Image (spheres, rainbow, N blue to C red):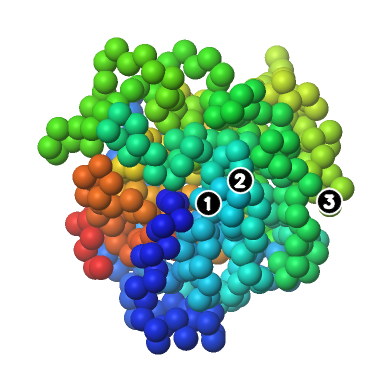
């Protein structure tokens, strides 16, 4: 994440490396991959806050990082989708991939990238752009970033969402990153795996979902992402695509607090008696209160048509999910006030379960906390697997690509990005787990079961092995 100016970090790459990337795509440096279950492996252990509304899972009780990780040099914001041709296709932005730069935070000139990830080994993928990054105006917002991305029956549906007021916005002496989450202006469509694109017929001022009620106001289906149902959506329960969005209420009874710069050694202080109208990132690119759910039968005719969508509207007296075509009747799928944010989910056939990744990154430019939930059905109930305080230490955009899940569902690869804002507001950020970076990260993990304690499960020092 971050502003378009973050691309400058990538311009320091040597001329030789740029030539190699342009000629052959992005490849990993395998020499930095560590052996599975080796001395660098550790189980992530963080206490779950007492106020957590999710019961602990009785079948999956933790996550073990084996120490194996990728070493790609490419941009940010990766959500790989497993297509019918066997390849992964993903959006990306804010950085450089395959020798091409892209940034999504420049108003009318906002751009998003599209890439194919070729190969069956997550450590040796060949990553190429399918076509040059595409421009689509974010106005009246200033950011327009990649959202839900789905390749189904050879057609790529690529969504975006808006952010404001700016990628580095100062208020009360504190620098924020995109503190206001905006609307979702539909999907662009490619019928040739990303070589050519049809622009979305919708705009930030005429978005897919009828929200927000006012400029910079809260939304519910914010930054939506498709549930990963496997290759060509093979495990969808009904042939429909499901979208998870993050949101907040119009009149939040307990919003995020007003803050100001902290004293030496502190990131921020709570500002008592604050009366200004600034929302203090109550609903930002990475902080929210609820998760919402929608579904649609994907086709070029339906994907940008609000009337084709159904929205989760709670459960009936028998505990069965209620679906409605009326957006005004949408209800939260799950809720943890002031503890939610970016959300993704993947179906794991070996476990016959869904895994959900949630990141609470408030106040947008400090350390971030993520957690993993599990459920037998997409409509819940959802249970806590692992709470990961300060994961990354600033990890975000977490997801489990279905292509890299073992047959038993116990070994997976966690995709994420990390540490885009070191030094902002004086914050020092380390890399934990080792091998993270600002850009595409893939880390092998194993899910733990009750009573299981993997060998060498000692947490390394942050930054060790870099």
**Disc with the residue nearer the chain's start (3 vs 1):** 1
**Residue under the image location 51 percent in, 58 percent down:** 103
Badge 2 crowding class, 10 Å Cα cut-off, few under 14, some 14 to 19, many 20 or more, is many
Residue sitting nearer the eye, 20 or 33: 20
**Residue under the image location 25 percent in, 54 percent down:** 430
Q: Are marks 1 and 2 in contact (CB under 8 Å)?
A: yes
User: In the drawing, does residue 64 fall left or right of residue 224?
Assistant: left
Q: Position of residue 422 (x, y in %)?
A: 28, 52
Q: Position of residue 380 (x, y in %)?
A: 60, 32
Query: Is any atom of residue 214 visible in this view?
Result: yes
Instruction: Return the residue at label 2.
Output: 138
Foreground mark, 3 or 1, reads 1
Secondary structure of the residue carrying numbered label 2: loop
Q: Position of residue 8 (x, y in %)?
A: 38, 64
Residue sitting nearer the eye, 264 or 356: 264
Instruction: Return the residue at label 1.
Output: 106
Badge 3 crowding class, 10 Å Cα cut-off, few under 14, some 14 to 19, many 20 or more, is some
The image quarter containing residue 274 is: top left
Secondary structure of the residue carrying numbered label 3: loop
């Amino acid at each position: 994440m971050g502003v378009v100016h973050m691309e400058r970090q990538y311009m320091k790459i040597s001329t030789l490396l740029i030539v190699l990337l342009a000629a052959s795509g992005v490849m990993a440096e395998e020499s930095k991959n560590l052996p599975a279950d080796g001395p660098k492996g550790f189980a992530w252990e963080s206490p779950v806050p007492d106020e957590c509304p999710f019961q602990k899972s009785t079948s999956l009780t933790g996550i073990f990082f084996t120490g194996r990780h990728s070493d790609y040099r490419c941009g940010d914001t990766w959500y790989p989708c497993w297509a019918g041709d066997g390849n992964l296709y993903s959006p990306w932005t804010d950085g450089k991939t395959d020798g091409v730069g892209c940034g999504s935070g420049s108003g009318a000139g906002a751009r998003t990238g599209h890439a194919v990830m070729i190969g069956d080994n997550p450590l040796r993928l060949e990553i190429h752009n399918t076509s040059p990054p595409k421009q689509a105006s974010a106005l009246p917002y200033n950011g327009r970033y990649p959202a839900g991305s789905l390749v189904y029956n050879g057609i790529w549906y690529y969504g975006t969402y808006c952010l404001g007021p700016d990628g580095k916005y100062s208020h009360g002496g504190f620098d924020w990153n995109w503190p206001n989450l905006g609307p979702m202006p539909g999907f662009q469509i490619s019928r040739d795996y990303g070589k050519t694109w049809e622009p979305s017929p919708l705009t930030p001022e005429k978005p897919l979902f009828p929200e927000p009620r006012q400029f910079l106001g809260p939304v519910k289906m914010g930054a939506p992402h498709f549930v990963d149902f496997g290759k060509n959506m093979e495990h969808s329960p009904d042939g429909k695509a499901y979208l998870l969005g993050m949101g907040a209420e119009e009149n939040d009874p307990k919003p995020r607090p007003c803050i100001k710069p902290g004293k030496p050694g502190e990131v921020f202080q709570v500002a008592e008696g604050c009366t200004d109208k600034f929302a203090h990132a109550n609903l930002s690119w990475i902080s929210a209160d609820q998760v919402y759910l929608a579904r649609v039968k994907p086709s070029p005719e339906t994907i940008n048509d609000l009337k084709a969508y159904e929205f989760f509207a709670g459960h009936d007296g028998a505990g069965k999910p209620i679906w409605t075509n009326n957006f005004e009747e949408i209800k939260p799928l799950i809720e943890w006030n002031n503890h939610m944010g970016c959300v993704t989910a993947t179906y794991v056939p070996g476990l016959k379960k869904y895994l959900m990744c949630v990141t609470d990154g408030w106040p947008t430019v400090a350390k971030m906390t993520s957690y993993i939930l599990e459920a037998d059905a997409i409509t819940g109930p959802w249970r806590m697997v692992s709470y990961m305080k300060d994961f990354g230490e600033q990890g975000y955009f977490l997801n489990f690509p279905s292509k890299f899940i073992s047959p038993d569902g116990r070994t997976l690869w966690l995709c994420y990005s990390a540490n885009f804002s070191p030094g902002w507001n004086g914050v020092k950020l380390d890399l934990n787990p080792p091998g993270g970076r600002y850009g595409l990260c893939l880390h092998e993990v194993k899910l733990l079961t009750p009573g299981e304690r993997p060998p060498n499960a000692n947490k390394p020092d942050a930054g060790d092995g870099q």
